């Protein structure tokens, strides 16, 4: 039963852009909290060094937390999906705003060629801003 949950969670995470190993680690920690890197490596069938590298990536992104317990590092998943999605929407919004600025800085024929892209960028930004404004209503 837990394996089916883990498998579905891995699918969600891969859609969010997680790599295969990172998705495996996060899904494992979400269903079996408080594991050492060695335990995680054995559980997912991956080399310890690869596991550590992926754990560090996940920690930098805020998806995994590390604490010290009995002289060992223990890892757990940050399963606040709303927070994760909010942070991702913020990152996407910032990137789209940078893209909009670059497009507006174009001159002449280059700007004209990017007109359709500029419209799509504005539409996406309006969508994101509308979603964040709606959160305050509930």
Image (spheres, rainbow, N blue to C red):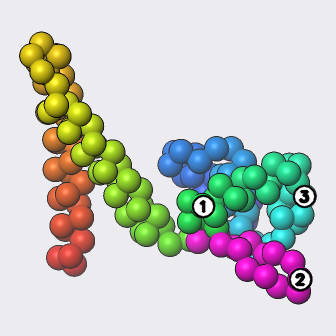
Residue under the point 71% across and 74% down? 66
130 and 10: which one is in front? 130
* Residue 83 visible here: yes
| Spatial CA span between label 2 and label 1 | 22 Å
Question: Which range is magenta?
Answer: 65-78
| Spatial CA span between label 2 and label 3 | 20 Å
- Disc 2 target residue: 71
Quadrant placement of the N terminus: bottom right
In this rendering, the label closer to the viewer, 1 or 3: 1
Looking at the magenta stretch, what is its main secondary structure? strand
Against 34, residue 100 (above or below) is above
* Residue 24 visible here: no
65 and 24: which one is in front? 65
- Disc 3 target residue: 42
Residue under the point 88% across and 54% down? 48
Q: Circle 1 — which element?
A: helix
Locate residue 46, reporting x and y percent: 86, 49
Q: Reading the chain from its start, which is encountered first: label 2 or label 1?
A: 1
Locate residue 61, reporting x and y percent: 56, 59
Query: Residue 124 is drawn in which quadrant?
Result: top left
- Disc 1 target residue: 60
Quadrant placement of the C terminus: bottom left
């Amino acid at each position: 039963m837990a394996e089916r949950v883990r498998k579905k969670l891995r699918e969600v995470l891969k859609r969010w852009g997680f790599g295969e190993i990172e998705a495996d680690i996060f899904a494992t920690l979400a269903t079996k909290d408080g594991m050492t890197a060695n335990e995680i490596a054995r559980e997912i069938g991956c080399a310890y060094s690869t596991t550590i590298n992926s754990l560090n990536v996940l920690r930098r992104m805020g998806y995994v937390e590390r604490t010290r317990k009995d002289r060992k590092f223990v890892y757990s998943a940050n399963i606040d999906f709303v927070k994760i999605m909010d942070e991702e929407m913020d990152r996407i919004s910032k990137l789209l705003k940078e893209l909009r600025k670059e497009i507006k800085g174009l001159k002449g024929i280059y700007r004209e060629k990017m007109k359709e892209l500029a419209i799509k960028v504005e539409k996406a930004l309006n969508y994101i801003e509308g979603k964040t404004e709606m959160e305050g209503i509930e």
